[in-house]
Image (spheres, rainbow, N blue to C red):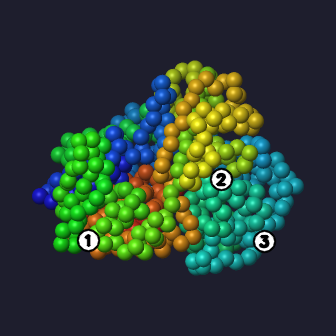
């Protein structure tokens, strides 16, 4: 029986382990460094108020991911209407942005938007230019004035970087999936969904189900087991060494599937002879941290929005949501949680701030914008995520490729998932990555099989909010 060690019990790792156990002939063990499965797909609970680490809506164009979603009981699937707005120039507008609404509410400025957009449409862009930045792509799509009014401030706030130093992959991934093939004179809007499907009680219900399935199919999940070393045997990875509460533990494997951050995985390969330049290139791949600043209001709802986006620099938040607008069971009657997301690059001012100071500052800023009254805030908490989003800086693709090229030498070591492939994806993409990793693990050359998926199928994934 083939032994497969899976590092990480997020949705990708659990989907991979479940598929391996279900197909038989494999002894799968999942090694998770935290005390619960789920990874970023957990649901926090604070005095009966539940919130995901970002609301994970159930939507996909991938049939295999849809099949996994459909396994959840029908009574646990919630349908709601999407109502998203953005706070810009001190006011709330519909999201995605509408030039028609801009025209009615700021007619003079909108004339400049329209003229600039027309100039961009009549111009040309080099879709095959590998050096084109995120800024260049957005200006080509929407014109300079709309870029400077809306896109540039929001990009700087979310990615904590100058858009000129960001790769245009962000545009293809999050704004216009067909950017590189769309005719130059075509106008596009960021994709969005009119309705939302959600899991009652939060996304962790899906992670718990996958974990149960793994164990019922004969797999094993070991919590509080942090992978700290790899053992090489005859050019392949023969064992994973973990730090556990009981001391070091060694897990032998015929194949290793890893969802740990790619720079950390390359770091574990350094004692095995990974060239210093590969370690440096992997170390250049940076992740954004994430703060969830949650304010609990003493009223049944703060508003009707599912999401509010904040391009306006006067508010430090990137995006906010109210869980009860996805599922009324996410909080008790008469109170509601308002969850604001703030990305951080390293230990910046927001990351260093005390929880109470963050909540007070956020309440002041939201009140100034007419979104939430400070006197309604009765409680709150802050949750910190060390690695949330891959930062697509210029040159990141070459760094990722160099790391993957090196890992190919082991043959039986597969890296996958958002952090393992440095690939900003939604949970449906994550699930499919797990299924592909399981297929790779049973092939003659797992690393080569998975690399073909990364170079092909995974590059077509795009995000629809």
Indicate which disc, 2 or 1, sits on the residue closer to the N terminus: 2
- Mark 3 sits on what residue? 119
Is the residue 95 above or below the residue 368 in the image?
below
Residue 52 lies, in percent from the top left, at: 48, 39
Label 2 crowd (10 A; few <14 / some 14-19 / many >=20): many
Does any portion of residue 101 appear in the rendered image? yes
- Mark 2 sits on what residue? 157
Secondary structure beneath dot 2 equals: helix
Residue 170 lies, in percent from the top left, at: 57, 63
Indicate which disc, 3 or 1, sits on the residue closer to the N terminus: 3
User: Are circles 2 and 1 on residues that touch, CB within 8 Å?
Assistant: no
Q: Nearer the viewer, residue 47 or 176?
A: 47
- Mark 1 sits on what residue? 411
At horizontal 57% and vertical 35% (from top left) the residue drawn is 355
Is the residue 382 above or below the residue 178 in the image?
above
Left or right, residue 61 beside residue 36: right
Distance of label 3 from label 1 (alpha carbons): 51 Å
Secondary structure beneath dot 1 equals: loop
Distance of label 2 from label 1 (alpha carbons): 40 Å
Snapshot quadrant of residue 446: bottom left
Quarter of the image for the N terminus: give it: bottom left
């Amino acid at each position: 029986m083939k032994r497969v060690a899976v590092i990480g019990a997020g949705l990708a790792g659990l989907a991979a382990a479940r598929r391996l156990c279900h197909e038989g002939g494999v002894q799968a063990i999942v090694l998770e460094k935290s005390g619960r499965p789920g990874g970023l797909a957990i649901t926090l609970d604070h005095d009966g108020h539940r919130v995901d680490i970002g609301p994970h809506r159930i939507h996909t164009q991938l049939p295999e991911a849809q099949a996994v979603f459909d396994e959840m009981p029908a009574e646990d699937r919630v349908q709601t209407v999407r109502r998203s707005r953005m706070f810009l120039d001190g006011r709330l507008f519909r999201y995605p942005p509408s030039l028609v609404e801009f025209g009615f509410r700021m007619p003079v400025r909108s004339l400049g938007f329209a003229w600039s957009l027309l100039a961009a449409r009549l111009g040309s862009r080099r879709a095959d230019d590998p050096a084109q930045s995120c800024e260049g792509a957005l200006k080509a799509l929407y014109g300079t004035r709309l870029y400077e009014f809306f896109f540039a401030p929001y990009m700087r706030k979310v990615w904590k970087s100058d858009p000129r130093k960001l790769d245009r992959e962000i545009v293809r991934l999050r704004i216009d999936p067909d950017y590189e093939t769309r005719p130059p004179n075509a106008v596009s809007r960021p994709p969005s969904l009119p309705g939302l499907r959600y899991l009652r009680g939060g996304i962790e219900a899906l992670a718990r189900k996958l974990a149960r399935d793994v164990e019922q199919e004969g797999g094993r999940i070991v919590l509080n087991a942090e992978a700290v070393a790899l053992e090489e045997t005859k050019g392949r990875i023969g064992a994973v060494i973990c730090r556990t509460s009981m001391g070091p533990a060694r897990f032998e494997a015929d194949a290793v599937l890893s969802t740990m951050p790619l720079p950390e995985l390359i770091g574990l390969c350094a004692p095995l002879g990974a060239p210093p330049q590969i370690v440096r290139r992997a170390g250049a791949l940076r992740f954004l941290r994430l703060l969830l600043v949650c304010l609990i209001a003493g009223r049944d709802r703060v508003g009707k929005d599912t999401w509010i986006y904040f391009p306006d620099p006067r508010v430090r938040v990137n995006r906010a949501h109210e869980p009860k607008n996805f599922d009324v069971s996410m909080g008790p009657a008469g109170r509601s949680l308002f969850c604001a997301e703030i990305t951080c690059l390293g230990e910046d001012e927001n990351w260093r701030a005390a929880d109470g100071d963050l909540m007070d500052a956020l309440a002041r800023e939201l009140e100034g914008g007419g979104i939430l009254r400070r006197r309604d805030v009765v409680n709150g908490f802050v949750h910190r995520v060390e690695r949330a989003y891959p930062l697509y800086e210029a040159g990141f693709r070459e760094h990722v490729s160099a790391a993957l090229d090196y890992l190919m030498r082991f043959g039986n070591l597969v890296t996958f998932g958002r952090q393992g492939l440095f690939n900003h994806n939604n949970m449906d993409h994550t699930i499919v990555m797990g299924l592909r990793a399981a297929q790779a693990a049973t092939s003659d050359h797992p690393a080569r099989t998975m690399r073909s998926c990364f170079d092909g199928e995974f590059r077509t994934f795009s995000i629809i909010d």
